[in-house]
Image: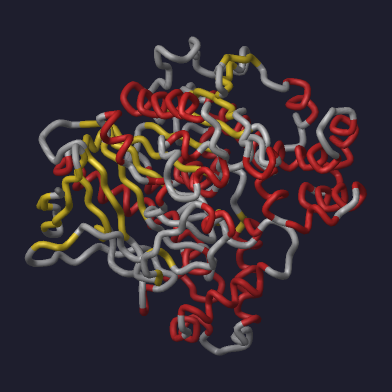
C-alpha cells in the first residue's frame, strides 16, 4: 500500500507517494502559471505556498491540438490548459544520497505531448538505475513559439522561445530543489526525443541554460529546427490575420483577451494550409536575445564544450509519418518524389536524387522518403556531433535499427519506436501498438535502458552487455547500432553522408 511522503522545496512542502521501492511526486509547479498578462511572456518565479501541497496526481498538460502519435502514446487523461508548468519526479528515495538526475523533454513537433505520457513513467529508471527522473510540461504551439517582437516590442522580444524558457525554468528548479529528492544538481543529464531533442540542441546554444546540465542525450532531433526572427514574424502575422487582428491598433492586448480554444483553432487553421511538416510554423526562434544565433553555430564556437553528448537517430524515421498519414499511400512515384522535393528543396533533391534512385528498397515510397529521414534527422545529428567535436567536446553516437512488427512490419525502425525501449516501458499503454509484441523486445530494451543509465552515471554509455563503444570522432565515426544483437560500425552510410556533404 502506498504511503504519503512529504518533501520540502524552496517554495513549500509537497506530498508524494512511495509505491513499492520508488518514490513519486507528480504535478509540482516550477513557475508561475503563464496566464492572463503572462501569456506569451517568459516564465515568472513561483509564489511560495503554506501547508502541504498534494503531489500525487499529474498537473494539467499544456493546451494543445492532440496529434496522432500522442494518442497512440496513450495521452494522459488529465486536464489541459495554459496553466501547465508542472514537473514530475521519480526517485529511489528522498534522502541525502546525491544520485544522477535525468530531466526529460518530451517530443510532439512543438505542438503536443506532455511529461505525464505513460511511456515516460520513470519507475524503471529510478528502481533499476539509482537515478532521479524528472519529466516536465512546457508551453507548446502558439503559446510557446509565437514570435511577437515586431508587434509587442521589448516585453515580447523572446515570446517565440517561451517553450524553451520554460524548460530552462524547470532546470533552474531542479538545480535549486532536486537535492531534497535524493538527486545531485551538479550531475544532470538533459534528454529528449524529436522536438524534445531539438529543444535540447537549442538549449546547448542558449546562454541562460549554461551550467544547468552536464550531459545531454538527443534522440532523433538536433540543431537544425529553428527559425529566423524574420520568418517567425511572418508566421505571427499569419496568425494575426487568421484571428482578424492584422490591422488592430493593439494586437497584443487583443491576443491576451482571446480564449485558449480560439488561439488553438487559429494555429490549427495555419497548419492545415501546408502539406509539409508542421515544424515550419512552431519551433524555436533565433531571436538574437534568448537564442542569439543558430544553435549549431554556438556549439561550434564552444557553447557546449563542457557538456557530454549522446546523439542518435532511427534507421527509418520517416516511416512513422508515411504509415500514419494515409495521403502518402495515394501518391504514385512521381507524386512522392514531388512531395519530397517540396520538403527538402528542389535544388537539394536534384543533387541527391540519383544516389537514392540507385538504392534498393521495399517500395518507391520507402526509397524516396529515406531522403526525408536523412535530411530531417540523420544529417542534422551528424552536423551537431561535428560541431561539438570542433571545440573538443565529447560525443557518442548510436542508431536504432530494431524493426517493429506492427502494421504488418510497415513501421520498421521508425521515428519514436525507440522510446519504450529507452524507458523500459514496453508494457505501457500504446507501446505494443507501435512496437508489436515480439518476444525479442525485452532484450533490446535491456541494452538501451542500461546504456542511458550508464551515461547518466559515467558520462559514457558503455556497458558490459554492449560491444566496446568508443567516443565519436570525425576520423572513425564509430556508431553503436542497437538491435537484437547490437554492434559497432564506423562511418555508417559514408557514401550517403558524402552525397549530402555541402547541402546541409
Q: Where is residue 145 in the image (x, y as percent from the top left)?
A: 52, 63
Against 112, is 208 above or below? above
Q: Where is residue 328 in the image (x, y as percent from the top left)?
A: 79, 53
Q: Where is residue 365 in the image (x, y as percent from the top left)?
A: 82, 43
Q: In this view, does 309 lie to the left or right of 400?
A: left
Q: Which is nearer the eye, 332 or 151?
A: 332
Q: Residue 80's quadrant in the figure?
A: bottom left
Q: Which is nearer the eye, 216 or 435?
A: 435
Q: In this view, does 170 lie to the left or right of 290?
A: left
Q: Which quadrant: the C terminus? A: top right
Against 310, is 273 above or below? below
Residue at image position (45%, 38%) is 426
Say if residue 330 shows up in the picture: yes
Against 54, is 397 above or below? above
Please count the marks in the image.
Answer: 0
Residue at image position (20%, 58%) is 55
Against 427, is 148 above or below? below
Say if residue 222 shows up in the picture: no
Residue at image position (38%, 57%) is 137
Name of the residue lying farthest toward the top: 468
Q: Where is residue 179 in the image (x, y as percent from the top left)?
A: 17, 40
Amino acid at each position: 500500500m502506498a504511503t504519503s511522503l512529504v518533501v520540502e522545496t524552496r517554495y513549500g512542502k509537497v506530498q508524494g507517494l512511495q509505491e513499492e521501492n520508488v518514490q513519486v511526486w507528480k504535478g509540482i509547479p516550477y513557475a508561475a502559471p503563464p496566464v492572463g498578462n503572462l501569456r506569451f511572456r517568459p516564465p515568472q518565479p513561483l509564489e511560495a505556498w503554506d501547508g502541504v501541497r498534494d503531489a500525487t496526481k499529474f498537473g494539467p498538460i499544456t493546451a494543445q491540438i492532440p496529434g496522432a502519435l500522442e494518442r497512440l502514446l496513450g495521452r494522459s487523461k488529465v486536464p489541459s490548459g495554459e496553466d501547465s508548468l508542472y514537473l514530475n519526479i521519480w526517485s529511489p528515495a528522498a534522502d541525502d544520497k546525491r544520485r544522477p538526475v535525468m530531466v526529460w523533454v518530451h517530443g510532439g513537433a512543438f505542438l503536443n505531448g506532455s511529461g505525464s505520457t505513460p511511456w515516460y513513467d520513470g519507475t524503471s529508471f529510478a528502481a533499476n538505475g539509482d537515478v532521479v527522473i524528472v519529466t516536465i510540461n512546457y508551453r507548446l504551439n502558439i503559446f510557446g513559439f509565437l514570435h511577437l517582437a515586431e508587434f509587442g516590442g521589448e516585453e515580447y522580444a523572446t515570446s517565440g522561445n517561451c517553450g524553451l524558457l520554460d524548460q530552462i525554468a524547470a532546470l533552474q528548479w531542479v538545480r535549486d530543489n532536486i537535492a531534497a529528492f535524493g538527486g545531485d544538481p551538479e550531475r544532470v543529464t538533459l534528454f529528449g526525443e524529436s522536438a524534445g531533442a531539438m529543444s535540447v540542441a537549442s538549449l546547448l546554444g542558449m546562454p541562460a541554460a549554461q551550467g544547468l546540465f552536464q550531459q545531454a542525450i538527443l534522440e532523433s532531433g538536433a540543431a537544425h529546427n529553428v527559425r529566423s526572427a524574420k520568418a517567425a514574424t511572418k508566421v505571427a502575422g499569419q496568425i494575426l490575420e487568421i484571428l482578424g487582428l492584422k490591422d488592430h491598433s493593439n494586437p497584443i492586448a487583443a491576443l491576451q483577451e482571446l480564449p485558449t480554444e480560439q488561439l488553438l483553432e487559429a494555429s490549427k487553421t495555419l497548419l492545415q494550409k501546408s502539406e509539409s511538416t508542421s515544424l515550419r510554423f512552431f519551433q524555436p526562434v533565433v531571436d538574437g536575445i534568448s537564442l542569439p544565433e543558430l544553435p549549431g553555430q554556438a556549439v561550434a564556437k564552444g557553447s557546449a564544450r563542457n557538456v557530454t553528448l549522446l546523439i542518435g537517430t532511427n534507421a527509418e524515421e520517416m516511416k512513422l509519418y508515411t504509415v500514419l498519414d494515409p495521403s502518402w499511400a495515394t501518391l504514385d512515384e512521381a507524386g512522392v518524389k514531388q512531395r519530397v522535393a517540396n520538403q527538402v528543396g528542389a535544388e537539394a533533391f536534384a543533387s541527391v536524387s540519383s544516389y537514392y534512385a540507385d538504392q534498393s528498397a521495399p517500395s518507391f515510397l520507402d526509397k524516396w522518403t529515406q531522403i526525408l529521414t536523412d535530411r530531417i534527422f540523420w544529417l542534422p545529428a551528424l552536423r551537431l556531433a561535428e560541431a561539438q567535436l570542433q571545440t573538443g567536446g565529447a560525443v557518442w553516437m548510436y542508431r536504432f535499427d530494431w524493426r517493429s512488427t506492427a502494421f504488418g512490419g510497415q513501421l520498421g525502425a521508425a521515428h519514436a519506436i525507440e522510446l519504450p525501449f529507452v524507458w523500459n516501458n514496453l508494457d505501457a499503454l500504446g507501446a505494443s501498438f507501435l512496437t508489436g509484441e515480439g518476444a525479442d523486445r525485452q532484450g533490446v530494451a535491456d541494452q538501451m535502458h542500461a546504456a542511458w543509465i550508464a551515461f547518466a552515471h559515467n558520462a559514457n554509455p558503455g556497458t558490459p552487455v554492449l560491444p566496446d563503444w568508443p567516443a565519436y570522432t570525425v576520423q572513425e565515426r564509430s556508431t553503436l547500432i542497437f538491435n537484437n544483437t547490437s554492434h559497432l560500425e564506423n562511418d555508417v552510410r559514408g557514401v550517403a553522408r558524402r552525397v549530402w556533404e555541402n547541402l546541409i
